[in-house]
Image (cartoon, rainbow, N blue to C red):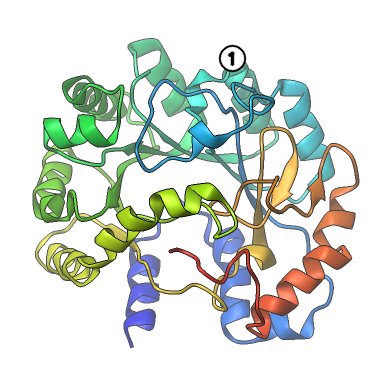
Amino acid sequence: MGFYREIFYWLKHLRFFDVKCSLWSTLEFARGEFFKRERMPLPRVVQLEPTTKCNFDCITCTRKSLPKSRLNRDLTIQDFHAILGRVPTLKVVKLQGLGEPLMNQHIWEILEYGKRRGIKFLTTINGSLLNPPNIVKLLKYFDSICISIDSINPETFEYIRRGAKYEDIINNLKLLVENKRKFKAATEVGVNFVASHLNYHEIPDLCRLGSKLGLNFIYIVEVENWATPEEKEYHQQFEFIREARKVKRKIRRLILDARRYGKLPIYHGDSNRRKPKCSWCFNKCFITVDGYVTPCCIRMNPKVFNFGNIFEEKFNNIWNGEKMRKFRISMIKDKANPICDQCPD
């Protein structure tokens, strides 16, 4: 019953996503239509990594494990042209990966070109680069902007998001919301909160702050292990994840209470086992800054697993290739799959 309640909650508050292109394949998967398809239609949604540069060093991020060859890389405007050409069905692009999107030196060119092509852009950013000129452009190009706020306690915030200054980020968020009102922008503005044993008790105050600021939504996601058991980073994060899971029921209760007593939409990314329900490989994918197509935004390390490189072969050959089809079958039949078996732990 909880699963359907969550679906109805999302549908009730869905505003910043195009319903047709974000839900059609998920709903078909839920009723079994995907079981009948060997070849999938090209996706309308992708998550694209715009850069691996970042000015923070967050404790739950695996960016520090990237090899030097992949660090501090930017997606170029030529790369973006190529991706849109190879995936002509695209309608929605989420710009987010192991880096701060606004640090890409080509970001405004990418957004301008995408808008001319009718692309809807979503992003999650760290909020450090929200100066007035950037805010005006962000509100022009993005349909949804999410700011990462992992604590509303300055000390905890700066412990989790190393390199950040709490007051600066909160002031930047306020400035973004003020400009949204001033220019009557349609852009949805919200915050992303990674919940763990360090900060879960702040959820009620976070929701009150969100309502006070006039946010459109809050997304609370339980902390996830971005690595697989074969990677050393998995074991480095294991103890932290285990401690976080001890409070998962408290997290869910606080979210339910906040939804019951507040008007602000609160979305919840829980820590339940996702396989075989996950629909990522059926309707969208993650593309790294250097073009590798990976299963999702959590299993994004191409050195561990990838389906191919969009700059080196036709995307349709990747999307409907043997490797991807076998991956889908493992999901449908819930067969052993070392990439997804432990997700999100």
Instruction: Tell me: residue 128, above or below residue 40.
Output: above
The image quarter in which residue 290 lies: top right
Residue 238 percent location from the top left of the image? 39, 57
The image quarter in which residue 248 lies: bottom left
Residue drawn where x is 47% and y is 26% of the image: 140
Residue 133 percent location from the top left of the image? 40, 11
Residue drawn where x is 66% and y is 39% of the image: 288
- Direction from residue 13 to residue 321 in the image, left or right: right
- Direction from residue 242 to residue 42 in the image, left or right: right
- Direction from residue 240 to residue 55 in the image, left or right: right
- Of 209 and 156, the residue lying toward us: 156
Q: Secondary structure at mark 1?
A: loop
Residue drawn where x is 59% and y is 86% of the image: 31
- Of 48 and 306, the residue lying toward us: 306
Instruction: Tell me: residue 224, above or below residue 287.
Output: below
Instruction: Tell me: residue 218, above or below residue 54.
Output: below
Residue 221: tell me if it is visible.
no
Residue 293 percent location from the top left of the image? 73, 48
Residue 197 percent location from the top left of the image? 20, 55
Considering the image in quadrants, where does the C terminus appear? bottom left
Residue identified by numbered label 1:
105
- Of 75 and 140, the residue lying toward us: 75
Q: How many marks?
A: 1
Mark 1 surroundings: few (<14), some (14-19) or many (≥20) residues within 10 A = some
Instruction: Tell me which amino acid carries mark 1.
Output: Gln
Considering the image in quadrants, where does the N terminus appear? bottom left
Residue 120: tell me if it is visible.
yes
Residue drawn where x is 11% and y is 55% of the image: 201
- Direction from residue 292 to residue 166 in the image, left or right: left
